């Protein structure tokens, strides 16, 4: 299975999570702007960027389709960092966001293969928006759905290496049972079991700067604990005549790490006023809930706790998001420190 997944590395896919049949045969163009301001003793970043995207779907048979989404990111700014990990530095890149193939012979059964967008799980303490080479199977049973994903997590190690070999191909499994009901007033709940296996040394080495417990240095770097546990996600909205009440969040638990290092949560409480949404957030992610290389830098990865304020303005074809967050390390160390982050993101689809 791992060898099959590896050959699909150039593809990409995504899950509809129990929604209706995909809207196929379309072409969309998108434009975005972003601003990140990061302030800490070890990081001072000011980055402004533009993003241009293309999204294309094509149905080549009644039960099969291809789709493709790519983006170009152009950023400028400054990034002063203590250490070798500069995750907020300006970026210029061409990205395959998603694109691949799917097969849906029945309304209740769906298979996708390619590089799946892990941001679809809305669980930033476990996974952020990133593409993993993977296969995903979906079974829809009314308001209940099952998702089974087998993946190779990316590790940014694309060059040939001589003289050393990692323990094996990195592997990630995520199996989910979910429930979703309603549209205006809705409730969604997902319970997943996740497992990472054979993660390479460069992932462990970089995760040390993000709060994980690591032994060794360089090619000898390895995680102190395995990663296998449960991830819980929920999202709900209750509408009245004038406003909506929003409540969403995530809880993660790693059964392979000891107490005090194995759990994390992220909670949002918000109000929706027509086109404006205001949300308060609180989060805490202990040191070894998940590999920090793959989770959200905007929540400090691991060994961090904090609070934030989010403003979102929705128009018919555009969205503006503003976010301010302040976070501090749970356990003091020489690498992490208190951090403030301001984000601005604007996205428009044509």
Image (spheres, helix red, strand yellow):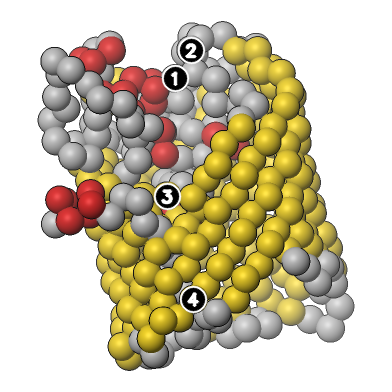
Question: Is 189 placed above or below 293 here?
Answer: below
Question: Is 199 placed above or below 102 here?
Answer: above
Q: Is residue 209 visible?
A: yes
Q: Position of residue 230 (x, y in %)?
A: 32, 54
What's the CA distance linking mark 3 and mark 4?
A: 21 Å
What's the CA distance linking mark 2 and mark 4?
A: 43 Å
Q: Secondary structure at mark 3?
A: strand
Residue 165 or residue 69, whichever sits in front: 69
**Of label 1 and label 3, which has the lower sequence position?**
3
Q: Secondary structure at mark 1?
A: loop
Q: Position of residue 295 (x, y in %)?
A: 46, 40
- Which residue appears at 76% of the width and 59% of the height? 348
Which of labels 2 and 4 is toward the front?
A: 4
Q: Which residue is mark 4?
A: 58
Question: Is 337 placed above or below 102 here?
Answer: above
Q: Secondary structure at mark 4?
A: strand
The disc at residue 131 is 3
- Which residue appears at 36% of the width and 73% of the height? 102
What's the CA distance linking mark 2 and mark 1?
A: 9 Å
Q: How packed is label 4: few (under 14 Cα within 10 Å), some, or many (20 or more)? A: some
């Amino acid at each position: 299975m791992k060898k099959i997944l590896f050959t699909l590395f150039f593809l990409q896919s995504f899950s509809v999570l129990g929604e209706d049949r995909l809207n196929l045969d379309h072409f969309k163009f998108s434009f975005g702007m972003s601003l990140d301001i990061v302030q800490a003793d070890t990081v001072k970043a000011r980055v402004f960027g533009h993003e241009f995207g293309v999204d294309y779907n094509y149905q080549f048979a009644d039960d099969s389709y291809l789709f493709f989404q790519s983006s170009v990111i152009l950023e400028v700014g400054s990034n002063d960092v203590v250490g070798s990990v500069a995750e907020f530095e300006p970026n210029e890149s061409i990205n395959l966001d998603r694109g691949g193939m799917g097969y849906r012979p029945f309304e209740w059964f769906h298979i996708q293969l390619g590089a799946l967008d892990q941001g679809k799980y809305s669980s930033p303490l476990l996974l952020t928006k990133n593409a993993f080479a993977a296969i995903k199977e979906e079974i829809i049973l009314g308001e209940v759905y099952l998702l089974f994903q087998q993946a190779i997590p990316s590790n940014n190690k694309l060059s040939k290496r001589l003289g050393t070999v990692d323990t094996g191909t990195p592997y990630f499994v995520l199996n989910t049972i979910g429930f979703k009901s309603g549209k205006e007033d809705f409730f969604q709940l997902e319970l997943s079991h996740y497992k990472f296996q054979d993660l390479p040394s460069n992932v462990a080495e970089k995760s040390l700067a993000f709060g994980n417990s690591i032994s060794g240095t360089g090619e000898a770097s390895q995680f102190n604990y395995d990663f296998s546990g449960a991830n819980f996600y929920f999202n709900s909205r209750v509408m009245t005549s004038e406003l909506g009440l929003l409540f969403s969040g995530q809880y993660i638990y790693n059964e392979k790490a000891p107490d005090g290092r194995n759990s994390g949560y992220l909670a949002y409480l918000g109000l929706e006023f027509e086109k404006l949404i205001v949300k308060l957030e609180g989060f805490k992610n202990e040191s070894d809930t998940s590999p920090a290389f793959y989770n959200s830098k905007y929540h400090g990865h691991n060994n961090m706790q904090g609070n934030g304020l989010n403003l979102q303005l929705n128009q018919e074809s555009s969205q503006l998001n503003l976010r301010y967050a302040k976070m501090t390390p749970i356990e003091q160390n020489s690498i992490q420190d208190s951090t403030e982050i301001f984000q601005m993101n604007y996205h428009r689809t044509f």
